[in-house]
Amino acid sequence: MFFSFLICLKFYCLQFVSAYAFEAMQKVDVVRLAALSDTELRLLLPCLVRMALCAPADQSQLWAQDKKLILRLLSGVEAVNSIVALLSVDFHALEQDARKEQQLRHKVGGSNGESILVSQLQHGLTLEFEHSDPLRRLRLTLSELLAIMNKVVDSNGEFFLKSSELFESPVYLEEVADVLCILQAELPSLLPIVDVAEALLHVRNGDWFLCLLVANVPDSFNEVCRGLIKNGERQDEESVGGRRRTEALRQLCQMNPSQALNIRAMVVEECHLPGLGVALTLDYKPDAADEAVSPLVSYVSGLLLGTNSKVRTWFSMFIRNGQQRKRESSSVLWQMRRQLLLELVAILPRSRSTHVPNDGDMEGENISGYSGLREEHVVKASALLRLYCALMGIAGLRPTDEEAEQLLQLMTSRPPATPAGVRFVSLSFCKLLAFPTLVSTPEQEQLMVMWLSWMIKEEEYFESAAGVSASFGEMLLLVAMYFHSNQLSSIIELVCSTLGMKIAIKPSSLSKMKTIFVQEIFTEQVVTAHAVRVAVTNNLSANISGFLPIHCIYQLLRSRAFTKHKVSIKDWIYRQLCETTTPMHTQLIPLIDAYINSILTPASKANPEATNQPVTEQEILNIFVCSAQGEGSRGGRQRYSITTQLLILYYILSYEENLLASTKQLALMQRKPKSYSAALMDQIPIKYLVTQAQGLQQELGGLHSALLRLLATNYPHLCLVEDWVCEEEVTGTLPLLRKMMLTSNTCRYTQSQLHQAFQKLPSSSPRLMRILEHLTLLSPGDLIPYAEALTASMALLLESAVPRRILQTLSKLWMGLNTVMPRRLWVMTVNALQPSAKLLRQQRYTQNDLMVDPLIVLRCDQRVYRCPPFMDIVLHMLNGYLLASKAYLHGHLKETADFDRQTQTVSSLGVPGQPDTPEVTREELKNALLAAQVFHLLRRGVENDEPEGGLFSDLREVQCLICCLLHQMFIADPNIAKLVHFQGYPQALLPLTVAGIPSIHICLDFIPELLAQPQLEKQIFAIQLLSYLCTQYALPKSLSVARLAISVMGTLLTVLTHAKRFSFFMPTLPCLVAFCQAFPPLYDEVASLLVQVGQVCASDVATKARDIDPLIGSSKLTLPQRTAEELSGADPDVQLCYCVEATFMDIISSTLHGL
């Protein structure tokens, strides 16, 4: 009896296949197999026997030698004979019987007791198995296995444990395993190994059978594991079946540890069996231990902090469900927590305790002795902190008292001053904010306060010693500011951003921390005073991550803390802007916007003087000391980066725009902040800087687009479409190819040589042309040193003997320079092209002069009006200055109107009934001034119709250029066209304007309004303009307006006085000829009008007893020629009669000519 018990005990301590043995089987390493013990070899006999007896596919000599060794190895093992007997069975017949039995089992009404494989069982399965021959053993095992497999299929995923005497008897386990392995190997289609593995999970000792089965078919390892994982539960520790499946897979991976990580990857991919993934990680022993982060921390962190939300939810559910069960040592979750706690305790400073040192303990080296975290443990400690944050914040882990205590000890540790140490302190601080419940006792709260005080004291040392720009001091300051302004949501966002995960933090949970910060550590006045003393970040760029001083200053500016406590922040912001580089930090533009707002808007209405000071003009000039001259001195190295200059430019433009937009509010508060002077703006190379920003758009973020928006509003003359097109031509592919042709001596020409070539014209024309052609190969930036010489000599090129090619080349160079230094170039050009009389008086215009009065550009040397290349330059400048003048007038109007209106309101003491008309009057005056400027352009451009010693084509080209500019202006703002034509211009210009300005057809919209004006001159101009428009644009709309004009003329005939009738009809009657030519249906109306006019005039003449020679009754179709003396001396009515006759004849002649 005792002997039988020992046998059972021996067999119940089942031996699994070792990793060494499995690797030997997998590689068929005969030498390793020979080194196995008899017990280990016994488990692999089914495969080895089949290997030795079956005909091999490998016929090499090497395998023949290995096969001999295997036979020698098997020769001394007694169990080989029984396996050989099993292989001698007719497996084909056995498979047919098995198929029949499966069909019988699937029959409706088929009895479970019926079996084709096994019949007439007289004893239990174990005794039958013992007394049976090999064939019957195979049948018994196959019948039992098929029954389990069928039940698995019918269970619909519900786990069951099948009590099977055959698979539970400790005496015959090895023989049953042999039979199982042989059956699966010989009948693979009937017994797929994945289905067999699934069935074995439902019997006792199933994991042992499964390992033996896979060990004898080592190639099926991955297939079996993937099948078991696919069919597994989403949460394996929730059921017995899940735990058995996890344990079986864990045993398989212990047998083949090299595939453990691949199996773990399958678990994550399928989101099944989370406990298995953790168990495999706990079992995993890396070849080279990583001192930084353990495999468990890396694995769990990857699941919870990865980008796959499905995996995160799946593993979080595993944590939540695992906490609901009682603490069990066998639970994978509690094994994981215990391992994490052991790792945490292992890196804690040995001298840590809840004892709070006094101030004396914090001096000198006692700090590191008290709680120094070893440098090699800092990275691991940071990883552990993030993992616990993810477990508690995402997965809902509730820490035990022991875990909470050890976590607090780790968080309040004091690491060495390294970048990793700065990161650790930041994480610890954010974890305290995210989970304030970790601090539960007064002793722990005092420990936290002391640690925060240590942070304040040591942050400067950490920043300098660690060599990082983003220290934890800025974060501490930022949180203090958020607490003072009660921006708890911003604190939560800051915590989540630093930890790198989204955690649900209730604002109410921060109340204790808020009290500590606001009352014990940081008052608002301390915050502002400390913020100003914080050093700026050197070379601030987007490459510097973390929370920086700029974040703190930005929040304080938004909360108006500096102005509230009268702390000047201007110098700090100026220094930080000077310490910037590319790629630009994203917080710089919001900082500038908040700073500008704090300058213009007081913190409270009660104290309107509580504002920050703007940057001084001298400080701004210091930034542009190298680039202000010629928009960039190309030789010397700039002291400040391009990022600094662009940010200062953005500050100035944005400040001016906000100042203009806030004039109404500032007027109500009787405040008028100082605007930056025009002299300062003239010294800033705006266009050059914006051009540089265009090439750095990727590194400047949204700064380039913001500058373009500000330029379009405040400096529209720097945003001309023509300039952008020219820039494409200058910086395109063709200019790049031409620049590649430059030789080393291309730039040998100096400015003095260029000046001498200009002075010796026209004899030096070839040399000058050669110099100019070389200059065209240079980039616009390289042309800047030659700008003075090129513009100063432009007047010399107005002589008639100068070749046209030189003029065109110089115009091309001027347009290139215009892309980098337009404003300074325009002033130089305008001064250079002044008439000789003004040059003698040394009258030099400034940028402001030209902006106030753009017509100065047209008061140039008269020869420019017959030089098309230079006229193109003049018109380009004029267009720019007109836009600049419009923006200047708009700003001046808005600024003065708001302050004048406020003064008027204050002086009237609220008396009602006074109309608010000044603003309307100012707007009308501004529009009238713009129209007058355009009208002057019309007059100056074409006032000399006949060429004077020059080419008529030059005049025509100049007129085309002027008409093209007017066309662009009318399209950009149709109101300008309306204002110009309401003011009127000489009738001699109408043929040119109507034919040369394509957009002049818009005048048809307002001619009826012009005809309704009371002034006779405007009505005459409207009819004359309409006559040319009808000829140029014979449209239905033109016909309707012409009918209206004829009707108006008929009406005026009855109401005008004798003198006004003559003044009106003499210039308008010839226009009727054009109406009839354009629209023949108007013949009747025109003829009726002419008859009426003729009758009125004839009756007046008859009353005066004057004789006239009427056309009526004459058989000739031509009028006798009237001399000028005859017409001038005749009576007005007589002249009008002659005019009617002439109009009739012109209409008849044009009709006959048309036929």
Image: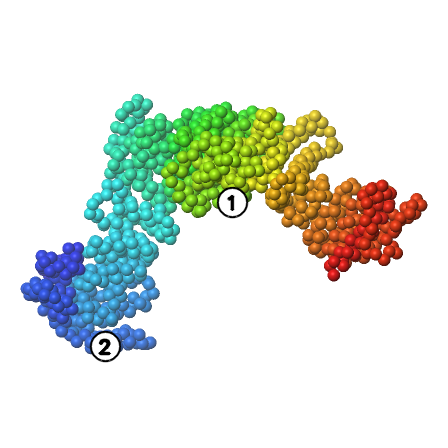
Q: Quadrant of the N terminus?
A: bottom left
Q: Amino acid at mark 2?
A: Gln
What is the number of the mark on residue 725?
1
Helix, strand, or loop for circle 2? helix
* Residue 96 disc label: 2
The answer to whether residue 832 of the structure is visible from this angle is yes
Question: Is residue 97 shown above or below 28?
Answer: below
| Residue lying farthest to the front in this orientation | 763
At 35% from the left and 48% from the top, the residue drawn is 306
Residue 194: x percent and y percent?
A: 26, 64
Is 1125 situated above or below 202? above
Q: Please indicate whether residue 508 sits to the left or right of residue 1142 in the image.
A: left
Three-letter amino acid code of the residue under disc 1: Val
Residue 1051 visible somewhere in the drawing: no
The number of numbered badges drawn on the structure is 2
Q: Position of residue 12 (x, y in %)?
A: 16, 58
Q: Which mark is residue 120?
A: none
The way the protein has been coloured in the rendering is rainbow
Query: The C terminus appears in which quarter of the rendering?
Result: bottom right
Q: Residue at x 12, y 72 (%)?
A: 85
* Residue 96 rendering spot, x and y as whole percentages: 23, 77
- Is 692 left or right of 229, judged from the image as shown? right
> In front here: 524 or 330?
524
Q: Residue at x 18, y 66 (%)?
A: 181
Q: Hey, which quadrant is residue 744 in on the image?
A: top left
Residues packed near mark 2 inside 10 Å, few (<14), some (14 to 19) or many (20 plus):
few
Q: Nearer the viewer, residue 44 or 1119?
A: 1119
Q: Nearer the viewer, residue 344 or 1066?
A: 1066
Label located before the other in sequence (2 or 1): 2
